[in-house]
Amino acid sequence: MQNTRAEAVVGTGNSVEFDTSFIVFFLAMEIGRTGSIFALENIVMLPALVAVMVAPFYFLPEDMSYSRWFAGRAVIAGLGLIIGAAFGAAVGPLFPEVFSFLPFTFLVMASMVTAFLSFASLLRFEEAR
């Protein structure tokens, strides 16, 4: 079985897609939690969300359709926005105010795990042939 260069660099395509899906979800959840799309932090986070949604496609095998792949990412981001808006409305009346930091905390943890897995796949040794 022969690996492509992209698979040798970042691991399998499914791993990259699966890891960054968590980042897309929690970033969209944080954007939805604030309640206003035109807030200053959302103006900064929206380009980051689009970049995290689009960039992993270029590390996947070439036989995938971009529109089908991006539609799945858009569904994940949409669910994150809806759940984040519901969570933002529930903080205060239902949850303590300190829970408002959970989406960003999970975003940071998911980013750290993704970075670790990416670096681990870069540093993986393979036998010379």
Image (cartoon, rainbow, N blue to C red):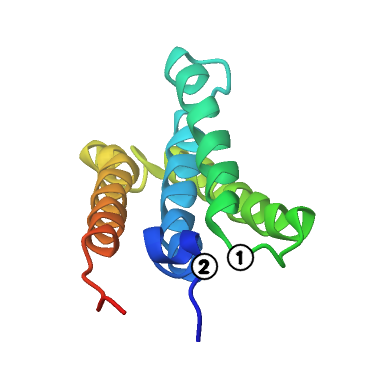
Comparing marks 2 and 1, which lies closer to the viewer?
2
Q: Pinpoint residue 43: horizontal percent, then vertical percent.
A: 52, 17
Q: Which mark is residue 11?
A: none
Label 2 with label 1: CB-CB less than 8 Å: yes
Element class at badge 2:
loop
Would you name the residue on which mark 1 appears?
61
Residue name at image x 66 percent, y 49 percent = 74
Residue name at image x 50 percent, y 61 percent = 17
Q: Which mark is residue 4?
A: 2
Q: Amino acid at mark 1?
A: Pro
Most foreground residue, 66 or 30: 66
Quadrant (top left/top right/bottom left/bottom right) for the C terminus: bottom left
Most foreground residue, 86 or 62: 62
- Res. 81 in view: no
Q: Residue furthest bottom?
A: 1
Q: Is residue 97 above or below residue 129?
A: above
Residue name at image x 55 percent, y 43 percent = 55
